[in-house]
């Protein structure tokens, strides 16, 4: 495979249409979904010349975890819909690539089993746990305890989903339930039996403060688009921001993640890491996002395409393709390391007229 687009095409051919559309789809008219990728194409890089070194260092520390490149895996649900090895394959591939995996609360494998699979490949594998706060705090606390016991070193709280998004592709297929034999395994062994994942508009900053007080793990807020919310998150002592529009699956009228990044990076001012996901498909996208202030970027669907195309090996290919492309793009930009990626490298496509 020579690009993520090729793996996407293989996955499209392999998956049942209703499962492909569940993974690929977005909310409503899919404007935000498409814009996540298009927005990168509206930006251009102004490379610097004569770097004076052939060495490039791209490792980055993310809340105490060393990632071998500034690309991590964002949380996506139901990996066993993509491949029978599901999240075990993902966990092994991400551990082998030595980067951070954010496990979804809606995984079809328990967080404990994912951690064991990752650790069998690399005892120091970095695993974070994504969480939707549940109105029953006993459930939330139990999930946090299991993630902590499994060795997760950060919690990623998804805050862009006060209600479920409307996915018209799923409605067209009548896709409402997982097939027989697959389940959101983290939600099974709970007081009162299995539970559905709840999204709640009742949640407020107070609930996040409650979570903050209940754990010593660093907390990342996922799904921040408004600079004011980023400011509040930093002021209230949260440890990281993940700029995301949920892959265009929640509010359709939002901007592309990369377009929302600059103002958030400015407000945060380096006080906490600013992560981004949405539409990252090329090494040059990684360069652009880092130049505009991201500490690292996440990929969602490309991992699902790798998994559907070839299981663990497919996910490894996705990560190694991006690693190679990012390193190459950094070299072509005259960069020697991540610190060389500054915002003066990014411009908007179109003629630079009238700027003097
Ligand atoms: C099929 C699918 C399932 C997802 N499940 C979750 C989830 O369980 N929790 C979450 O916070 N985000 C979830 N997301 C959003 C991703 O974490 C991420 O924000 C998004 O996919 C990034 O965009 P990309 O797919 O363009 O890389 C999901 C996305 C997809 C496509
Ligand atoms: O599909 C999603 O984007 C998602 O976030 C989710 C949330 C709960 C259960 C399954 C998926």
Image: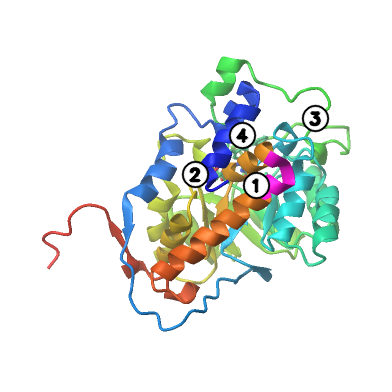
Instruction: Report the side of 353 relative to 268 (left or right).
Output: left
> Which residues make up the magenta segment?
310-315
Residue 86 location, x and y as percent? 76, 40
Q: In this orientation, does residue 309 appear?
A: yes
Question: Which circle's residue, 3 or 2, is located before the other in the chain?
Answer: 3
Mark 4, residue position: 11
Q: Which numbered mark, 4 or 2, is in the foreground of this view?
A: 4
Left or right: residue 211 versus residue 52 is right
Q: Which quadrant of the view contains residue 128?
A: bottom right
Q: Identify the residue under disc 1.
A: 75
Cβ(mark 2) to ligand 1 < 8 Å? yes
* Beta carbon at label 1 within 8 Å of ligand 1: yes
Q: CA distance from mark 1 to mark 3?
A: 18 Å
Of callouts 1 and 2, the N-terminal one? 1
Mark 2 secondary-structure assignment:
loop
Magenta: predominant secondary structure element?
A: helix
Residue 352, percent from left and from top? 17, 59
Among numbered discs 3 and 4, the one appearing first in the sequence: 4
Tell me which label, 4 or 2, sits earlier in the chain. Answer: 4
The question of residue 129 being in magenta is answered with no
Discs 1/4, front: 4
Location of mark 2 (residue)? 245
Ligand 2 quarter of the rendering: top right
Which residue lies under the disc numbered 3?
182
Compute the Cα span from label 3 to label 2.
27 Å
Left or right: 121 as drawn, with respect to 261: right
- Mark 1–mark 4 Cα distance, whole angstroms, equals 19 Å
């Amino acid at each position: 495979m020579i690009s993520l687009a090729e793996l996407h095409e293989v996955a499209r051919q392999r998956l049942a249409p209703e499962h492909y559309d569940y993974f690929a789809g977005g909310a409503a008219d899919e404007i935000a979904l498409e814009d996540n990728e298009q927005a990168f194409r509206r930006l251009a890089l102004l490379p610097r010349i004569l770097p004076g070194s052939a060495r490039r260092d791209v490792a980055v520390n993310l809340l105490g975890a060393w990632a071998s490149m500034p690309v991590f895996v964002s949380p996506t649900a139901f990996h066993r819909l993509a491949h029978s090895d599901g999240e075990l394959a993902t966990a092994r591939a991400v551990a082998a690539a030595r980067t951070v995996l954010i496990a979804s609360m809606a995984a079809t494998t328990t967080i404990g089993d994912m951690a064991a699979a990752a650790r069998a490949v690399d005892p120091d594998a970095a695993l974070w746990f994504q969480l939707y706060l549940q109105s029953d705090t006993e459930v939330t606390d139990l999930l946090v305890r299991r993630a902590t016991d499994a060795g997760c070193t950060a919690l990623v709280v998804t805050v862009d989903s006060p209600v479920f998004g409307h996915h018209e592709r799923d409605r067209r297929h009548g896709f409402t339930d997982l097939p027989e034999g697959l389940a959101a395994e983290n939600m099974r062994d709970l007081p009162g039996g299995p539970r559905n994942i709840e999204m709640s508009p009742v949640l407020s900053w107070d609930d996040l403060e409650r979570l903050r007080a209940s754990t010593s793990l660093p907390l990342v807020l996922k799904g921040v688009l408004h600079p004011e919310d980023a400011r509040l998150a930093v002021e209230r002592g949260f440890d990281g921001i993940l700029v995301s529009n949920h892959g265009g699956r929640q509010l359709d009228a939002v901007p592309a993640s990369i377009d929302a990044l600059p103002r958030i990076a400015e407000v945060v001012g380096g006080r906490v890491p600013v992560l981004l996901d949405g539409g990252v498909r090329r090494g040059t996208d990684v360069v652009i996002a880092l130049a505009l202030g991201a500490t690292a970027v996440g990929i969602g669907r490309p991992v699902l395409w790798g998994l559907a195309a070839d299981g663990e090996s497919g996910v490894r290919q996705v990560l190694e393709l991006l690693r190679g492309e990012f390193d190459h793009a950094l070299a072509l930009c005259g960069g020697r390391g991540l610190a060389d990626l500054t915002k003066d490298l990014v411009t908007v496509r179109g003629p630079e007229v009238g700027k003097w």
